[in-house]
């Protein structure tokens, strides 16, 4: 059995604490981006669903949307929706492919899936500073920040989940902080603290935090002494297969050579040394 990545109880505690005094500006920005993208789709969605840990972010955005928590088993009915948005929670899933498959099954034919999650460039400054500080002072590393996927890997999940016309792209934002304490405070206020199952339970020593901040400032501080933090949000989009969707032509089915269409001459490639030569026509 694969070990769990996330301590779900700890994650729930952190989100409950964050909800009391939230700093959900990245969730708000993601919801704005999703709304803008949906506005570019020539489609009216009448049965949407949103998977999110913070329902308040989506109030009034998608009328009549079913709001679903990001539990390992999603409360979605098969074939019930024409739109499913998985909103900034997929990075905490032990089985992100399984989550996307569940969303795919909840879609009607030609229904749209939109997934948003933090990508591998997120908090790269903080991760590097913490790793260097802990290595300098303690001679080893402990899991402090959630490992996040790269776009080239996560985009492939769409096809594996059975979604058609898959697209993956990213949007990066840079947030400036007065100091490391303010950055950590914002992470806690959006429920993004350390909820790794393999985390050290003891608090990070102050000496390590001080060393991490010094490294952070030396490498990345701007001219005013502010600390930049990168937030990369990946957007995964795919459609439930339907007969009405465009399909690629079968290989070899073209009626005209590309060279003829371009009005140029075709030059066959020479075979590699040692390979069988192509027979002449």
Image (cartoon, helix red, strand yellow):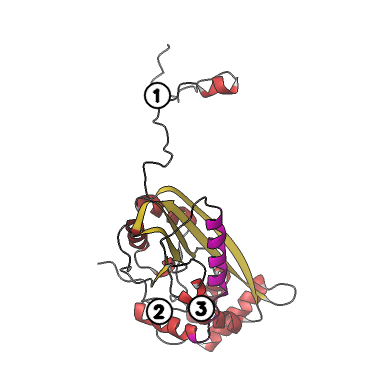
- 51 or 128: nearer the viewer: 51
- 33 or 210: nearer the viewer: 33
Residue 228, horizontal then vertical, whole percent: 64, 72
Residue 147, horizontal then vertical, whole percent: 45, 68
What is the magenta segment's predominant secondary structure?
helix
The answer to whether the residues at label 2 and label 1 have Cβ atoms under 8 Å apart is no
- 102 or 146: nearer the viewer: 102
Residue to which mark 3 is pinned: 190
The CA span between labels 3 and 2 is 11 Å
Residue to which mark 1 is pinned: 275
Badge 2 density bin: few <14, some 14–19, many ≥20, Cα 10 Å: some
Name the element at disc 1: loop
Q: Is residue 75 left or right of residue 150?
A: left
Residue drawn where x is 39% and y is 80% of the image? 12
Q: Which residues are magenta?
A: 20-40
The CA span between labels 3 and 1 is 59 Å
Name the element at disc 3: loop
Check if residue 36 falls in the magenta segment. Answer: yes
Question: Which numbered disc, 3 or 1, marks the residue that appears first in the sequence?
Answer: 3
Q: Is residue 80 left or right of residue 166?
A: left
Residue to which mark 2 is pinned: 11
Residue 192, horizontal then vertical, whole percent: 48, 76
Residue drawn where x is 42% and y is 42% of the image? 245
Name the element at disc 2: helix
Residue drawn where x is 42% and y is 36% of the image? 248
Residue farthest right in this picture = 223
Question: Which numbered disc, 3 or 2, marks the residue that appears first in the sequence?
Answer: 2
Q: Is residue 146 above or below residue 154?
A: below
Q: Is residue 121 visible?
A: no
Question: Which numbered disc, 2 or 1, marks the residue that appears first in the sequence?
Answer: 2
Badge 3 density bin: few <14, some 14–19, many ≥20, Cα 10 Å: many
Residue 174, horizontal then vertical, whole percent: 63, 68
């Amino acid at each position: 059995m694969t070990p769990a990545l996330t301590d779900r109880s700890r994650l729930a505690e952190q989100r409950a604490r964050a909800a009391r005094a939230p700093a959900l500006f990245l969730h708000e920005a993601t919801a704005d981006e999703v709304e803008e993208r949906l506005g570019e789709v020539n489609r009216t969605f009448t049965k949407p669903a949103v998977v999110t840990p913070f329902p308040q972010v989506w109030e009034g955005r998608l009328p009549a949307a079913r709001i679903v928590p990001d539990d390992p088993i999603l409360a979605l009915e098969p074939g019930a929706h024409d739109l499913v948005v998985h909103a900034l929670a997929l990075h905490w899933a032990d089985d992100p492919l399984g989550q996307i498959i569940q969303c795919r099954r909840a879609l009607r034919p030609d229904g749209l899936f939109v997934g948003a999650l933090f990508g591998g460039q997120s908090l790269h400054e903080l991760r590097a500073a913490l790793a260097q500080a802990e290595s300098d002072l303690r001679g080893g590393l402990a899991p402090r920040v959630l490992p996040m996927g790269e776009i080239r890997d996560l985009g492939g999940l769409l096809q594996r989940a059975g979604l058609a016309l898959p697209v993956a792209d990213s949007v990066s934002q840079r947030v400036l902080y007065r100091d490391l304490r303010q950055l950590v405070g914002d992470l806690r206020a959006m429920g993004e603290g350390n909820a790794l199952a393999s985390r050290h339970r003891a608090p990070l020593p102050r000496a390590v935090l001080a060393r991490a901040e010094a490294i952070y400032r030396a490498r990345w501080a701007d001219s005013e002494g502010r600390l930049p933090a990168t937030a990369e949000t990946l957007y995964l989009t795919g459609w439930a297969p339907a007969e009405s969707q465009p399909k690629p032509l079968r290989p070899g089915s073209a009626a005209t050579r590309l060279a003829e269409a371009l009005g140029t001459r075709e030059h066959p490639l020479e075979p590699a040394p040692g390979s069988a030569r192509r027979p002449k026509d």
